[in-house]
Amino acid sequence: MDCYIYAVEKSLDSYKFNLLQNKQVFINQLKSRNLAARTIDEGAIDENGGGSFSEYVAILSGNDDLLEKAKLDKKLAVLESERQAFYRNKGNAKGKLNERTSGIEKNNTFIGRFTRDWEYFNKVMPADTETGLRPNPLKLDGVDSDNVEILDNRLAAINRNVRTEDDYMKIGTLSDFRILVRTERICDGDTQTLQNKFMVEGLDGIKYTYNNGYIAKDPKLAVMNFINALERIPAMIEKREKENAELSKDIPVLQEIVAASWPKDAEIKRLNEELATLNRKIQLTIKPAGGHESGTDDGTEMKGQKATGESDDTPDLPRKARHVPPMEIAAPSNGLKKIS
């Protein structure tokens, strides 16, 4: 069964419904933890809704100054809400600008380190101009041979037997680059397995891997694993440069937002001055409840003192009946008169 609730436009019912709706919005924001600094607007007297409580009071009082004060209060509330939104947006833009700036600086740092490793790699192991192949000066600890099968067997033995407990262990060199292995725990559902990953360390400590660090079963591919890892450096530099280009797109707009200032400060200042002047005017027109005009009581009492001839420096006495001395009662007459 549907229940309908009716309200008349521009009435107190409309004001109450608007107020309840604002309260519900406030409660929803509180529950969703999206409660920023906000001002509840009670509405205004217009063709679409009712009036705020302060405007109703102003109209019923018949004082135009109260109605003007209610309008100024609403304008200030709207401007304050806009200013809060402006500075909130400015703070968000500042955070995003710092995030993007730090991201670009971080990428530039990595690009510099990648570039240094790549230049040194090309210097000590230059690619052949005809075949494009590079020399492979791989040296494994405990192996005094450059035979591909011997090196592959050594790598396979390390992969089977070595456990580093999540630490890095040096197992050889590639020119001035160190060859490392690390044992990691791989979770597959409820089971855990140990897996070794091989990598080559750059001059600044960056770890480069190929095929996610896993050694291939083919001997030639296994021995070329570390050369292939260093060959990925240009792609890594390109990836960082693309990230920088993407981060730099929004920086001019964010800088403009951060540098902007609130354009309506002068208007808020003017409205505050008008409101202060209006408040003083309202205070002068309102008499305190139960009060009298200044000087009435004191003037009446002073006139009474002057009329009775009392001195000016006589202290004020409490307002009560003055003491009257008792009157002597004459003896009753017997009703006889003496005749001479």
Image (tube, rainbow, N blue to C red):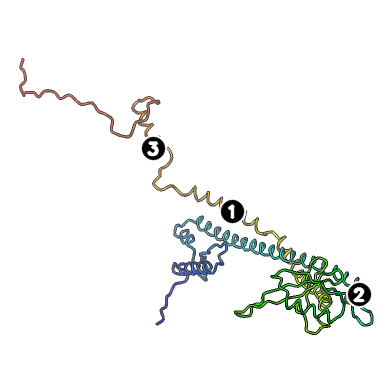
Earlier residue among tags 2 and 1:
2
Q: Secondary structure at mark 3?
A: helix
Which quadrant does the N terminus fall into?
A: bottom left
Which quarter of the picture shows residue 203? bottom right
The amino acid beneath tag 3 is Asp
Q: CB atoms at circles 3 and 2 under 8 Å apart?
A: no
Q: Position of residue 271 (x, y in %)?
A: 60, 55
Front tag of 3 and 2: 2
- The correct choice, above or below, for 70 with respect to 157 in the image is above
The amino acid beneath tag 2 is Pro
Q: Nearer the viewer, residue 116 or 121?
A: 121
Within 10 angstroms of label 2, few (less than 14), some, or many (20 or more) residues?
Answer: some
Front tag of 3 and 1: 1
Q: Would you name the residue on which mark 3 appears?
A: 297
The amino acid beneath tag 1 is Asn
Q: Would you name the residue on which mark 2 appears?
A: 126
Q: Position of residue 66 (x, y in %)?
A: 50, 56
Q: Would you name the residue on which mark 1 appears?
A: 272
Q: How many marks?
A: 3
Q: Position of residue 337 (x, y in %)?
A: 6, 20
In the displayed structure, does residue 225 sit left or right of residue 193?
Answer: right
The span from disc 2 to disc 1 (Cα, nearest Å) is 75 Å
